[in-house]
Amino acid sequence: MSWSKVINLSMPVFFICFSIFVIVSTFPMGKAEGTFPYMIGVFTLIVGVFQLFFDLVKKEHADKFKDSNIFKVIEFLGVLSCYIFLFKKIGYIADTTLLAFYAMYSLGYKNIKVAFPLAVLISCVAYFVFSVFLAVPLPAFFAE
């Protein structure tokens, strides 16, 4: 088996294992708290199985990570860690606005006059979807 094929197969295997972990972790939760993570786990499992199947039957495997910028990956993991840390402290809307703005700016969109209002809009729409349609309680603003 070639190294490119091993790399391509590692991600679907990881997502299958992670989704099984998420599904099993939802069992002790109540129905209200566990439904959404369970749905996400099942969806991720289905996508992972399909991706694994298609990667197994594929003949040619290109190196997907050949031109990857590992420092950008580490930087974004740090930003996501800050997002998780700040989530309960400054609330969903402010935290997600900062994350969305950072993501747009770091991906090359430099027009701040458009990016920041768009980040606020993304956060408010996501908050509305989670709180109204999915009934997921989120800390809107400064929680502590």
Image (cartoon, rainbow, N blue to C red):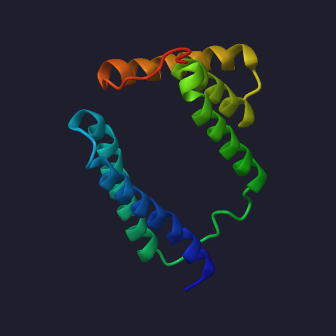
Tell which residue pokes out farthest to the front in this image. Answer: 144
Q: Nearer the viewer, residue 87 or 114?
A: 87
Above or below 117: residue 12: below
Above or below 102: residue 143: above
Residue 69 seen in this snapshot = no
Residue at image position (44%, 20%) is 127
Q: Nearer the viewer, residue 112 or 16?
A: 16
x then y, percent, for residue 125: 46, 18
Above or below 59: residue 55: above
x then y, percent, for residue 52: 41, 68
Above or below 32: residue 93: above
Residue 55 seen in this snapshot = yes
| Quarter of the rendering occupied by the C terminus | top right
- Tell me where residue 132 sits by quadrant: top left
- In the drawing, does residue 47 fall left or right of residue 75? left
x then y, percent, for residue 50: 36, 62
Residue at image position (66%, 35%) is 82
Tell which residue pokes out farthest to the left in this image. Answer: 31
Residue at image position (65%, 24%) is 98
| Quarter of the rendering occupied by the N terminus | bottom right
Q: Nearer the viewer, residue 144 or 60?
A: 144
- In the drawing, does residue 7 fall left or right of residue 140? right
x then y, percent, for residue 76: 68, 43
Residue at image position (35%, 59%) is 20
- Tell me where residue 81 sits by quadrant: top right
Count of numbered tags: 0
